[in-house]
Amino acid sequence: MNFFKNLKEIYKKVSEVESTIYSGKQDYLEIYERNLELEKEIEERTRELNIANKRMLTLQHIWDMMNASRPLQSVLETIVNSIQGELGYLHCNIIKKCEDENGIFMTVLAQSDDVSIKRVDRLIKTPIQTRRLVYNPESVYAKSAYSREIVQTLDIGGTLKSVVPDVADSVIKEIVDGSPSKSIINIPLFSRGNHFGWFNVFSSRKEMTTGETDFLTMFAQQIEMAITIAGLFEEVKAQAVTDGLTGLYNRRYFEEYMKKEVTRALRQKQTFSVIGLDLDHLKEINDKYGHAYGDLAIRTVAEVLKRNARSIDTAARMGGEEFNVILPGVDSNGAMAAAERIRKALEEEKLETIGHITASVGVATFLEHSDNIEDIMELTDQAMYQSKRNGRNRVTMAKPITETSWQEIAINTFTDILSKHNVPLDRNFADALKEKLTHPQNEVPKDALYSVADMLTRIYNPLHHNGVMKAKVLLAVSLAKRFDLPKEEIDNLRIAMLLYDIGNLMLPPELLQKPTPLTEEERNRIKTHPIIAAREILKPISDIQDVIPIIEHHHENWDGTGYPDKIAKEKIPMTSQIILIVDAYFALTQPRTYRAELTPKQAIEVIKQDAGKKWNNALVQEFIALIDIDT
């Protein structure tokens, strides 16, 4: 009996031990599982913290860029590349909503540089950033703009098709099938309460992760801030349209207003006139009485213009002592009467110490004298300077463009060269060019000049294109006006631009077109072409003696390393410097036998590198600004 009793007791103790062990095992298992959950939670929180840090750094990056006053385009491009690269999205872009006479459309303002977009561009043949994208009122873009909320769509193909409906369905399918993108997240952008466009994110996920909506909202707010800052900057810049001395509009405003007036006049088939006014004897006033009295004279002209202008007229100080007035809806007879009224009112003013001042005035009328605004401005200048040549203090109506002096001189010069056979040209070819100049048929004489200059240039440079000479002259004149050069100097510059390389006609074509590097002797021979042009071809022609020094020195460098005389800085005529930089730009952007052409942006970078050495720094700055405006 004791044996069974002891056995029962042992079994009981074993059961207690087993129960204790099992209970401990459960406790250990619970601790283990809890530790696993804690580790997993720590890992998740760490991952979220890393993402949050990246997001904060990206937002800080954007804020730093905005504070650095970088151009909007540069800021937006950096933004989309930052979020695409740092946060793992496959592609990002910023689309702007636009509107013109044909309705609402969209355009890609900035996009990340990645393999996804390069593949799309390749498949649709045309870079999407250069396309006019269709705005579909039923699209995800319209939906997000209307709701002012983030909208995610899985229909990538349908979204793409809505903006480029001309792309074949098979191409859209190929784009979607080969893309790792699973959804597009569309965030509307607003600036100062107005809808600006959209920020798009192409994601490899079908659903947005926790906190992603909040981050993208915050990110979009930073983009909106960048857009708003840029918009305010442009508004402030646009407000800087008045001349500080006179309170009149400045040249920049006048030129922009002129473009609008041309559009209006053509649409309504209604003339407008331009009055050009040049204060007489300003240099003498400055020299005799001081610049303070010169400024007084300039301000007096402005006051007379303000008093005698209608509310719809626009008066501007173009620089120095030169002023222009636009008279909308006024024909040449009305403009002559208005100009005479201004001239007489100015003459009757009596100023302290100086006494009376006068002005030389010119008038031209759009759609009467020409339907080309460049011609109108040129004709106004010519009439104004004709008043000056005829004794000042008078008003002159513009003459037909065939009678303008610089063109007469240029035509006579080319005719003289071709008639006397001063250059080695085929006689029949020379006679044909002379006939083109003297009997231009359907061309105005100025266009005939450009055409003849292009044809002569192609003799020594077969890669030269028609129309380049005209573009060179227009660019050179625009640059000269930025430095307020006198009209006579600008006229001489026009002629010099047509003739500056004519000395190349005296050099062997095989030398100028050599595809391999030149020897030192060959380079030195080419450097003689300004001397040949100036002293052998042009010197016998009496009408262009003032033009010859411009051509002779158009290869002199600002630092004195140029040729032929190695003169430097202000000793080089400004007109010669202008020819050098314009010629260099066109040479860089045109093909040569030994290299391909550069893009305008690449050419500008090359020119920048020689600022202060080959070119005057101020000249480079104005040239770059001018190229930016034109392009």
Image (cartoon, rainbow, N blue to C red):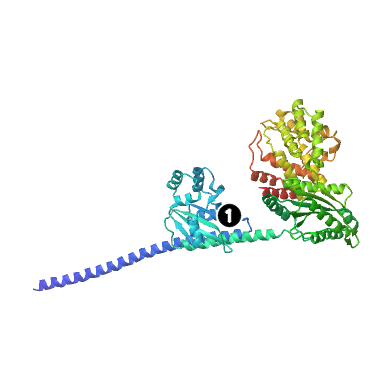
Name the residue nearer the viewer: 593 or 199.
Answer: 199
Q: Going 72% across and 43% down the picture, which residue do you hit?
A: 582
**Percent position of residue 630, x then y:** 68, 48
The amino acid marked with disc number 1 is Glu
All told, the count of numbered labels is 1
Where residue 405 appears, as percent x and y from the top left, is 82, 41
Q: Which residue is mark 1?
A: 99
Out of 390 and 208, give the one closest to the viewer.
390
- Crowding at dot 1, Cα within 10 Å, few <14 / some 14-19 / many 20+, comes out as few
Asked which quadrant contains residue 581, the reply is top right
Helix or strand or loop: what does disc 1 sit on? Answer: strand
Q: Nearer the viewer, residue 130 or 67?
A: 130
Q: Is residue 41 left or right of residue 493?
A: left
Q: Quadrant of the N terminus?
A: bottom left
In this view, 347 is above or below 567 = below
Q: Position of residue 462 (x, y in %)?
A: 68, 32
Left or right: residue 594 compared with residue 182: right
Answer yes or no: is residue 613 visible.
no
Q: In the image shown, does 33 or 393 lie closer to the viewer?
A: 393
| Left or right of 522 in this view: 134 | left
Up-down: is 133 above or below 471? Answer: below
Horizontal and vertical percent position of residue 17: 22, 70
- Extreme residue in the top direction: 427
Q: Residue at x 48, y 60 (%)?
A: 150
Task: Please say whether residue 22 is visible from this viewpoint.
Answer: yes
Which residue is located at x 45 percent, y 51 percent?
158
